[in-house]
Every structure is written in structure tokens, then in C-alpha cells.
Amino acid sequence: MLTIILAVEYDGTDYFGWQLQADKRTVQGELNRAVQKAFCKNYQIIGSGRTDTGVHSSGQIAHFVCDEEPKIPRHKVKLAINQKLPKNIRVRNLWFSELDFHSRFDAIMREYKYRFCRRPSVFSQRWTAAITYQLDVELLYESANLFLGQHNFLTFSKTNSTNSDYVCNVKKCEWTRQANGIYELTIIADRYVYGMVRALVGAMVDVARHWRTLQDIEFAIYTQDRTLKSALAPATGLNLHRIYYKEPFNDIIS
């Protein structure tokens, strides 16, 4: 058995998320079709995790298992798949593995980026949220520290009947201001619950707007009550940036 590992980037604006849906256009659905056309076999693509409608990725990792050596020469497999994909999805890199590998279950950390600008621009509107409120930037930075460590993030999640565990360990949560005036959040955690990053950004923006206090957010974390969440930040600004794996795959997939 041969596992083919894909590093995939996509603009999620025109898709109903990553997850395959029978009646909607999704990134996983497009990849399934492209691989089926390239290999003339119905291989199923498995991703490292889901992204919501409109969310992007520059570092999604996916895989599929071949029951035999592909008839396409290995050095042409990436090209063969990309030729069948729409232009807003690309296989950025590709690896072949004889070892057992699962893009989702072998992941140990996931890194997201969230970007917003203060002045909307036609050149960045597909990938950067526009947040035009007056913001206390120091409070924005300070509020990120509240989410570090292990917490129950029930408050900061969407309802999901399949999820019974809302505990996540956040290793990094930090805002920076880029040279172009864009504010970027980097968050790294062992796992995420449904809608979590956008919920956290919404809460931090509310603190920076002086709509909520740092103490309000601490209480919301402690109470585990969805009625205490802020509005979700727009999906436009969210990007699944990188997946971290156990060795030896973390050295290979980078």
C-alpha cells in the first residue's frame, strides 16, 4: 500500500468549506474529482481537519491510499492532479510514503492565522477581514493572553451534536501588526472546536472596542456558556496555515 500525502492551498471564498457535501461545492469534493480523473480510480481524500465556508488554507495536509503503484510516473503526479483542479485550489507539494500515515489522526498541533485590516481594499477583500471600529490595540494584544493554556472552550464554539469534548490546549495566541498595516493573529493548539478561532477573534475585537472587559472574557471561559460568546469574526480573514506532525513526518512535511 502506498500513501500519497498532499500539501494543499485554497481560496475558500467560493466553497462551502472543506468537508464533502452531496449538494454543495467543497474543497474535498473538488480534490476527490481531480484525483479520480487523474488516476481513473475512486480514491477518497482525507484532510487534517475541516475548514468552514469561506475559510482559506495555505497549509492543509491531506492524504489518500493507493492499492497499487500509480501508472502515472511519480514526478508527474502533482501536475496531473493540479491540471484537473480549479485555479483556486492547488497541490503545493506532494510526498509518497510506505509508512502508515493519517493526515488527521497523526496531527499533534494546528496553526491558524487570522488577518484583518482597518481600511477595506478591493485587493485584499477575499483574504483579509475589514474591521473598521476604533480599537484599543494594546487591549487587543492583552486579550490574546487569556486563551493560552488548557481551557474548556464551550463558550467559544458553535453547536455541534457530535462533539462532547471542548477542552483544547492553546500553545500560542498572539497578535502582530504587519508592515502593510494588517493585524495578524497566530494561534497554535492541539485541537479546536467548531467555530473556535472566529469566536475568539470576535471576543478579542469586542474587548478592543471597549464593548467587553478582560474580566468578562475570563468569566465567559470559566462559565462555559454559549450565551456569553461574542459574534463570530468574518470567515474571510481565517487561514489554516500549518499542520504539525509527529516524527518522522514533521521533518518531511514542512
Image: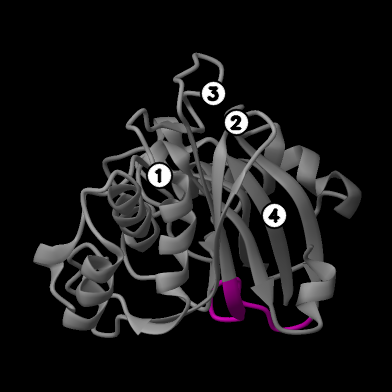
Range covered by the magenta-colored residues: 99-109
Q: Earlier in the sequence, mark 3 or mark 1?
A: 3
Q: Amino acid at mark 3?
A: Ser
Give the quarter of the figure containing the C terminus.
bottom right
Q: Are marks 4 and 3 in contact (CB under 8 Å)?
A: no
Q: Give the labeled residue for mark 1.
A: 136
As measured in the structure, the alpha-carbon distance from the residue carrying label 2 to the one carrying label 1 is 15 Å
**Residue depth check, mark 3 versus mark 1: number of the one nearer the observer:** 1
From where the camera sits, is residue 162 visible? no
Which residue is at a point 29% across and 43% down the rendered structure image? Answer: 209
The amino acid pointed to by label 1 is: Asp
Q: Position of residue 34 (x, y in %)?
A: 59, 41
Write down the quadrant of residue 132 in the picture.
top left
- Magenta span includes 136: no
SS label for mark 1:
loop
* Dot in front, 4 or 3: 3
Front position among marks 1 and 4: 1
Mark 1 and mark 4 in contact? Answer it, CB < 8 Å: no
Q: CA distance from mark 3 to mark 1?
A: 23 Å
Residue in front for this viewpoint, 238 or 67:
238
Label 1 vs 4, first from the N-terminus = 4
Crowdedness of circle 1 by 10 Å Cα count: few (<14), some, many (20+)?
some
Residue type at numbered disc 2: Gly
